[in-house]
Image (tube, grey):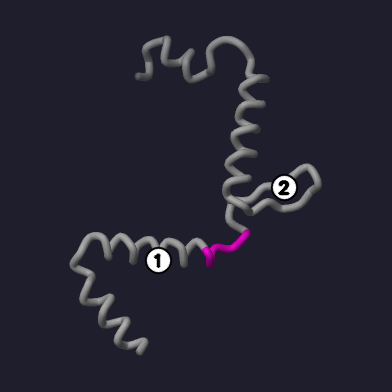
Amino acid sequence: MKENKQREIASDLSSSKNQNQIFQIARKIVKERQDVTDSSFLKDATDKVVVDENRIKDMRLLLQLKNEKHKAPGLSVVEMIQATGDID
């Protein structure tokens, strides 16, 4: 039965819809097998490791907004160098 399913999937590889499904499954498998040692984790206020991607995105967005609030007014170093005309 498993071999029949494999043959069926292999014969359907010519269609782009089926190719997309296979790539989605492969990406999902790779994602599930990633270690938590990846840079895709943060600690919350209670020192618990957060691995949920949606929560991580939200936390990173909040950190970015917080950092933008405390950013010194004026031009950044890159903007100052670009203003001299030495760098595009």
Q: Quadrant of the N terminus?
A: bottom left
Q: Nearer the viewer, mark 1 or mark 2?
A: 1
Q: Answer above or below: position of 29 versus 71.
A: below
Residue shown at the point (59%, 63%) measured from the top left: 35
Residue shown at the point (41%, 10%) measured from the top left: 84
Q: Would you say 31 lies left or right of 82 here?
A: right
In the image, the segment drawn in magenta is 32-36
Q: Are marks 1 and 2 in contact (CB under 8 Å)?
A: no
Residue shown at the point (59%, 34%) measured from the top left: 61
What is the spatial separation of the Cα atoms under label 1 and label 2, in whole angstroms? 29 Å
Residue 24 position by quadrant: bottom left
Q: Nearer the viewer, residue 25 or 68?
A: 25
Q: Which mark is residue 85?
A: none
Name the kind of residue labelled 2 in the image: Lys
Residue shown at the point (46%, 67%) measured from the top left: 29
Describe the element under mark 2 as helix, strand or loop.
Answer: strand
The chief SS type of the magenta part is loop
Q: Would you say 50 lies left or right of 5 here?
A: right
Q: Nearer the viewer, residue 14 or 81?
A: 14
Name the kind of residue labelled 1 in the image: Ala
Q: Nearer the viewer, residue 1 or 28?
A: 1
Q: Nearer the viewer, residue 31 or 35?
A: 31
Instruction: Name the residue tied to disc 2.
Output: 43
Mark 2 surroundings within 10 Å by alpha-carbon count, few (fewer than 14), some (14 through 19), many (20 or more): few
Instruction: Name the residue tied to disc 1.
Output: 26
Describe the element under mark 1 as helix, strand or loop.
Answer: helix
Q: Earlier in the sequence, mark 1 or mark 2?
A: 1
Residue 37 spot, x, y in % from top left = 62, 59
Residue 8 spot, x, y in % from top left = 26, 79
Asked whether 43 falls inside the magenta stretch, the response is no
